[in-house]
Image (cartoon, rainbow, N blue to C red):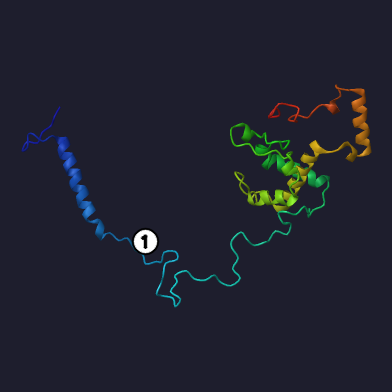
């Protein structure tokens, strides 16, 4: 049903509404020049712009002597150079157990429980991280792993806020243990373990529990423990 104005029978109510809106918009836009824009129009200098206020003509002021960039101060007593293989903590069972616990919490979602990059995050479509068991990472110094945990690398962000320095080294120690677990030589094992290994190989005790591969090991399909 069309509703027309009694004075202008050919103009519908909808056209009158559009005209009224346009008139209101013109009215408010005309008054914008009188609005206060102190935050937008405040006097200030753009970065590196010249300035007549200072004698050197620069708006940027020189840094105060002994200024240290945020995040650049070396306040980590356990930090070592990235290319260093030094280990600032004694490696013992307590450190390895702590490293395993922290690794399972913070690292295994991407790197997997065995360090082969088959974590749940990677299995669900995120780019798979490299395996710790490749030659490049097995030969990388311990300082490299500590630096990556501290500062991040690639898609991995920094864990310095979540993992304190001592726990970072615990994780590095556990990663080294994971690497050694797949690349240790039989001659480097303790005598009792060498004897157990030779005894198991000669008897062919395939049904023994101690010789079954652990869940998620390399002999299972990728992601079998998840």
Left or right: residue 89 versus residue 49 is right
Residue drawn at x 54%, y 70% is: 63
Q: Is residue 219 above or below residue 7?
A: above
Residue drawn at x 90%, y 35% is: 193
Foreground pick, 71 / 221: 221
In the figure, residue 64 lies in which quadrant? bottom right
Q: Position of residue 9 (x, y in %)?
A: 7, 34
Q: Residue furthest left?
A: 7
Foreground pick, 144 / 69: 144
Left or right: residue 42 versus residue 136 is left
Q: Position of residue 22 (x, y in %)?
A: 19, 45
In the figure, residue 109 lies in which quadrant? top right
Residue drawn at x 52%, y 71% is: 62
Question: Quadrant where the C terminus lies?
Answer: top right
Residue under numbered circle 1:
39
Residue drawn at x 75%, y 30% is: 218
Foreground pick, 82 / 101: 82
Q: Residue furthest bottom?
A: 55
Q: Is residue 53 above or below residue 212?
A: below
Foreground pick, 94 / 197: 197
Left or right: residue 60 versus residue 124 is left
Q: Position of residue 214 (x, y in %)?
A: 78, 30
Asked which secondary structure carries label 1, the reply is helix
- Local crowd size for mark 1, using a 10 Å CA cut-off: few (<14), some (14–19), many (≥20): few
Q: Position of residue 67 (x, y in %)?
A: 59, 68
């Amino acid at each position: 049903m069309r509703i027309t104005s009694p004075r202008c029978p050919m103009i519908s109510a909808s056209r009158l509404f559009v005209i009224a809106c346009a008139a209101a918009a013109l009215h408010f836009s005309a008054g914008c020049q009188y609005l206060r824009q102190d935050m937008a129009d405040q006097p200030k200098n753009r970065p590196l712009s010249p300035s007549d206020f200072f004698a050197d003509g620069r708006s940027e002021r020189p840094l105060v002597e002994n200024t240290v960039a945020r995040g650049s101060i070396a306040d980590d007593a356990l930090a070592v150079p990235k290319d260093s293989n030094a280990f600032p903590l004694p490696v013992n069972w307590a450190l390895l157990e702590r490293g395993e616990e922290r690794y399972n919490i913070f690292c295994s979602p991407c790197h997997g429980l065995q360090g082969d990059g088959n974590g749940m995050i990677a299995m669900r479509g995120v780019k798979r991280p490299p395996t710790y068991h490749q030659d490049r990472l097995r030969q990388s110094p311990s300082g490299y792993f500590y630096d990556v945990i501290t500062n991040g690398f690639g898609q991995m962000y920094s864990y310095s806020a979540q993992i304190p320095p001592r726990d970072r080294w615990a994780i590095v120690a556990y990663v080294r243990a994971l690497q050694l677990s797949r690349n240790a030589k039989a001659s480097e094992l303790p005598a009792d373990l060498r004897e157990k290994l030779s005894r198991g190989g000669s008897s062919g005790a395939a049904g023994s529990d101690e010789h079954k591969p652990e869940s998620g090991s390399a002999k299972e399909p990728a992601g079998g423990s998840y």
